[in-house]
Structure formats: C-alpha cells, structure tokens
Amino acid sequence: MAKVSKLMTRNKAATPLDTPTDLSKDAVSAVSDALNELLADTYALFVKTKNFHWHVSGPHFRSYHLLFDEQATQLYGTTDELAERVRKIGGTTIRSIAHIERLQRIKDNEQDFVSPLDMLRELMNDNKAMMSSMRKAHGIAEEHGDIGTTSMLETFIDGVEKRNWFLFEASRTADPTGH
C-alpha cells in the first residue's frame, strides 16, 4: 500500500514506525538518506567542536573556549530536529555510534594537540562542507516537494553560515596579517 493511501482512515493499526505521509516512497528514502548523512555529520562536528572546546590552549583561550562551546550547543540543538524530520516523513534514522561512523563525512580529529589557529581553520572547513551538504539535501527535498524539510534546512544553512563567518573572523584575529 502506498504511503499516500495510508493517510486515509483505516480500520487496522499501522505497522510500527510506518508514519503516514503524502510523500512518495522514493521521496521518503531520498530525503531520509540525505538527512541521516547530515545528522551523522552534525554529531561528528559536534564532538570535534567539543573536543576543541576542551583542549584549546593559548592567549585567546577564553574567547575560543566560549566560541567552540556556543557552536557545539548550536550543533547539538539541530540533531533532534533532523532526526525527528526523518521520522515525520516516514523514514527511520540513526541508531548507534557505529551507524553515525558509517554515514559521517566529517573526519574526526584525535590528535594530542591542535593549535588554536588550526582548530579554527579545521572547524571552518568542516562547516563549509556542512553548508555544501545541506544545500545538496535541500535540493533533494525540493526535488521531491518536501517543503517542511526545505524550510528546516534553510534555517540550518543560515546557522552554519553564521558559524563559518565567526570561525573565519576569529581565525583572522589569530593571524595579525589578516591572512
């Protein structure tokens, strides 16, 4: 039975986790896949940002410590919305750290020490990659007429652009020449 017809009144209970939607099965699959990749990347970037928050050192410690904590909080705040969007449209989402690891495109950083400037630049590059991935996911959602997902992603794209801007400007102040 097509998901569209499941929106109609029914006489028996729905299969567990089979959320009714008017999106096609292909749309649910494509959008869910794109959102799950974003969710895995968001968790990876959250952990990396917290790692840098905990391990930053140097003359700008307080500023970077607070910046990284603020950005990690923003990232974590999007995880539930991404996962719940997948469920709202009838998909299933990540279930474990191993699942995140299989889907993530943002690389972990397990170095013993990373200079503050390298932290800023790495996070900036990761946020740029997130921008690109979000725009791609937005295109997939738009292609399938999923206005709820496109709207949510537009807000998230604005947030990642702001994080990227702050990281860029902070990295400029770390380099007195402005390069």
Image (tube, rainbow, N blue to C red):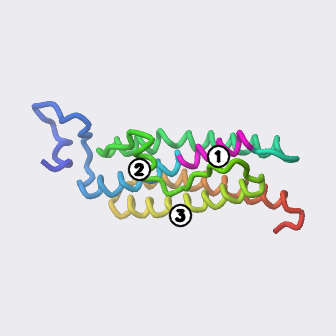
Question: Of the residues tagged 3 and 1, which is closer to the observer?
Answer: 1
Residue under the image location 62 percent in, 39 percent down: 73
Q: CA distance from mark 2 to mark 1?
A: 20 Å
CB within 8 Å, label 2 to label 1:
no
Residue annotated with mark 3: 132
Above or below, comparing residue 100 to residue 12 in the picture: below
- Which residue type does callout 3 highlight? Ser
Q: Which residue is mark 2?
A: 36
Disc assigned to residue 6:
none
Q: Quadrant of residue 166?
A: bottom right
Q: Is residue 165 left or right of residue 13?
A: right
**From which residue to which does the magenta span run?**
44-55
Report how far apart the C-alphas of labels 3 and 1 lie in the structure: 19 Å
Q: Image height check: is 178 above or below 6?
A: below
Type of the residue with mark 2 = Asn
- Indicate the secondary structure of the residue bearing disc 1: helix
Crowd rating for badge 3 (residues with CA inside 10 Å; few <14, some 14–19, many 20+): few
Report the quarter where the C terminus lies: bottom right
> Disc 2 or 1, which lies upstream in sequence?
2
Q: Which of the two discs, 3 and 1, labels the residue nearer the N terminus?
A: 1
Residue at 44% over, 46% down: 100
- Name which quarter of the figure residue 106 lies in: bottom right
Residue shown at 41%/52% (left/top)? 102
Q: Of 63 and 154, which appears nearest the observer?
A: 63
The percent coordinates of residue 74 (x first, y second) are 61, 42
The answer to whether any part of residue 152 appears in the image is: no
Among the two numbered marks 2 and 3 on one chain, the one whose residue lies closer to the N terminus = 2
- Residue to which mark 1 is pinned: 49
Residue 167: where, in percent of width, then height?
72, 55
Residue 55 in the image: x percent, y percent?
A: 73, 42
Q: Secondary structure at mark 3?
A: helix
